[in-house]
Amino acid sequence: MSAPRLWWPLSAVLVTGPSMSPTLRHGDAVLVRRGGRAIRPGDVVIAVFRTRPDLLVVKRAVRPEAGGWWLHGDNDLVTDDSRAYGVADVVGRVVARYWPSPGRVPPRRL
């Protein structure tokens, strides 16, 4: 995933990789509301794993844990999420996809 552009209060982020398929696919461009305050389980978020601070990821928030979040991808075949890297700090919540097919990115009840 590319680093977000700092447009306040929204940032543009390009999704790379298959971990959130089918919800988000490689090449999708999304808008992210920065900040991790109003995150709920099931939200799609942008985050940084504490064990991989160089890696910005898009994942689904599963549960709060140890002052951060436990995250999973929607694609069960890809395990580059909290199962591999542990707790993450949320940078923001994905609110919409604007490319290639504009639309809301709804939360999923877990």
Image: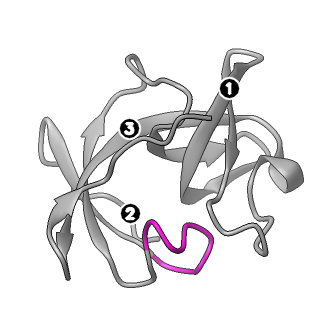
**Residue 3 numbered tag:** 2
What's the residue at 32%, 77% (across, down)? 28
**Mark 3 residue crowding within 10 angstroms, few (<14) / some (14–19) / many (20+):** many
Residue placed most toward the observer, 107 or 18: 107
Principal secondary structure, stretch drawn in magenta: loop
Secondary structure of residue under mark 1: strand
Q: Is residue 60 left or right of residue 105?
A: right
**Residue 30 numbered tag:** none
Q: Could you tell me how far apart the alpha carbons at marks 1 and 2 are, in whole angstroms?
A: 24 Å
What's the residue at 45%, 83% (across, down)? 26
Point out the stretch of residues depicted in magenta. 16-24
What's the residue at 59%, 79% (across, down)? 18
Asked where in the image residue 95 lies, by quadrant, the reply is top left
First along the sequence among labels 1 and 2: 2
Please name which of the two marks, 1 or 3, marks the residue nearer to the observer.
1
Q: Is residue 25 left or right of residue 81?
A: left
Secondary structure of residue under mark 2: loop
Work out whether 36 lies above or below 5: above
**Residue 63 numbered tag:** 1
Q: Could you tell me how far apart the alpha carbons at marks 1 and 3 are, in whole angstroms?
A: 15 Å
Work out whether 66 lies above or below 99: above
Q: Which residue is mark 3?
A: 92
